[in-house]
Image (cartoon, grey):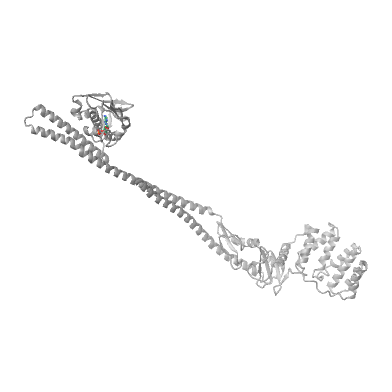
Amino acid sequence: MLPLFLLIAVLAPSGSVLWFMNDAARSQAEAARQRVTEAYRAQARILRDRVDESWKARVSSLDGVNDFVGAWKASGADAIILLDERGRPVYPARPAGPAPDPATDRPAWQLAEAQERGGKPGEAAALWESIANSERDPNLAGRAAQAEIRCLLGSGHRDAALGEIERRFGSGRWASARDLEGRLLAPDEQLLELHLLKRGAPRFEARARQLAERVNRYDDPPMLSAQRLFLMNELHALAPYLADFRWEAAETLAEQVLEAGRVTPLSTALESSGFSDVWKVASGDQRVLALYRSGTVAALTAPILKIGLGGARFTVAAPGAPPSDGVAAGRMLPGWQIAFTLFDTQALEQTGARRRAAYVWMGSTVIAAAILMSFGAVQFFRRLSRLNRLKTDLLAAVSHELRTPLASMRLLVETLLEDGQADAVKTREYLQLIAAENLRLARLVENFLTFSRIERNRQHFEFAPTTPAAVVESAVAAMGERLHAPGCQLDIEVNPGLPPLVADENALITVLRNLLDNACKYTPAEKRIRIRAHEQNGRVAFEVEDNGIGIAPREQKRVFRRFYQVDRRLARETGGCGLGLSIVEYIVRAHGGEVTVESQPGAGSTFHVLLPCQAAAREAAGA
Ligand code: ADP
């Protein structure tokens, strides 16, 4: 019951301690992580302000810029859309439908067109040529020249057509002439020239280079974006090695955004363009719309984020990105985040692990202390209850065992006193009986006292050199007349030259006296008692042998227990209280020795006491 109670008393607090430890370690780690995260969040707020500033500066640098390339360069954007004062796209612009043709009602034009349609390209070519020469409007003149070239080709005059392209459009005279859809005529004719020329010919190379340069130029006269993209495409096919157009991607993206999304409303903060993964921002004067892909926003912002604290990687995350630690990215990037990921979590984990180890250590110490204390408590209570039991046993034994010799002594004394003329022999006999009872009483009291000292840990031994012979002699002498009484044969055998012992001589005498006492008590008539001392394997062996009632094998271990008596009734008669052998064992053990019994019921018992002899004393004895 008690151990169970203590087990619960230990297990319950141990469980709580373990739980507490675990919980504390976890919340410590969490708190550390939160502290670090908070530090990085503060850093992210600083970076957010810088990022905001940089985007403000970037957007305000677009104020007053009104050309595609200039705006592209100033903004670092992926694409640019230029706007008019009403917010409509100017560049790239959707081609307007064909304008009314001012030439429709001119007779010369009608005639030339009729000839061409009537399948007379040769005549038509001549008519177109004269119109081209006389027309003052460059657009109309250019268109007539274009028609002339077309008719020359239609009539199979390829060289003449090439000559006319060169003569009329190579000079730059009609560089700004446009067709009804607003396309520039010259680049279109130059493209036709390329188609007519042999690839790789010097003139082809020169014209291709010129055309590629023209496509890359954004100065006057402005070219429609659609025409530019068309020419880029054609050049990719005709002269891929020249087709390296810096703004092709920007042109394409601007076209795509215009096609997919709405340009308005204009905002000076980064907003979705309506085209997947592309963001738009308008300049303060609302004449430039810069388009950024998410990757470009991140790349442009990265240099600012690089100056963040080490131990974390700061990035700018687009709206809808997977959630992570961070702060809102500020006014210029609404919905964006300055996010961070801790990549140096090792130090954090190490701190956590150290703390955990400390807690485990602390917890283990507490548990170990609790276990030790409960173990101590169990021992203490056990000892207490054993002492209590002993006390009861002792009281019972004392009251009973003392009463018997006292009663018989009183009886003897009273008989002597009553018999006024007792003869000397009878008196002596009575006195001898009284002396024997007295001796028995003294042994009992002595055993009680020894036992009591042992139990209270007050038994002290005084070790001093002595000889086995002296111990045997004193023990036999202390037994008095009992061993020399009639019907008792005593043999004493002490081998000569035994090594001396370092022992408490009185204690050893008690050992032998108790054994001799038992030999007397448990041997009925015709006692043959032998006491021997000899050397055995370097140790001194005492043996007390009798021819008494013997001890059954299963009792042979138990007889050394306190208060254990094989046959209580017999023990009462012989006057014992079950302490003699337990005292023997205690003393022998305290001397580093051991006591055993060999016995056969009905045949007698031999008690062996083996004691170590001190090497130094032994050498001295040999010398
Ligand atoms: P007690 O005071 O009863 O003799 P001991 O501790 O000396 O107590 O002995 C314990 C028991 O061992 C005895 O009661 C007895 O039954 C048994 N015993 C001891 N010595 C002998 C012996 N020489 N022969 C037979 N039985 C013995």
Residue at 32% over, 26% down: 536
**Residue 11 percent location from the top left of the image:** 40, 49
Q: Nearer the viewer, residue 309 or 357?
A: 357
Q: Quadrant of ligand 1?
A: top left
* Rendering quarter of residue 400: top left
Q: Is residue 159 rendered to the left or right of residue 282?
A: right
Total marks in image: 0
Q: Picture coordinates of residue 603 (x, y %)?
A: 28, 25
Residue 506 in view, yes or no: no
Position of the C terminus, as image quadrant, is top left
Is residue 324 found left or right of 555 in the rendered image? Answer: right
What residue lies at 27% left-to-right and 43% top-to-bottom? 388
Seen in the picture, residue 26 relative to 581 is either above or below; the reply is: below
Q: Residue at x 14, y 34 (%)?
A: 409
Judge left or right: residue 125 versus residue 225: right
Taking the image as shown, residue 205 lies to the left or right of residue 326, namely right
Question: Which residue lies most toward the bottom here?
Answer: 105
- Where residue 112 sits, quadrant-wise, is bottom right
Figure quadrant of residue 468? top left
Q: Nearer the viewer, residue 361 or 143?
A: 361
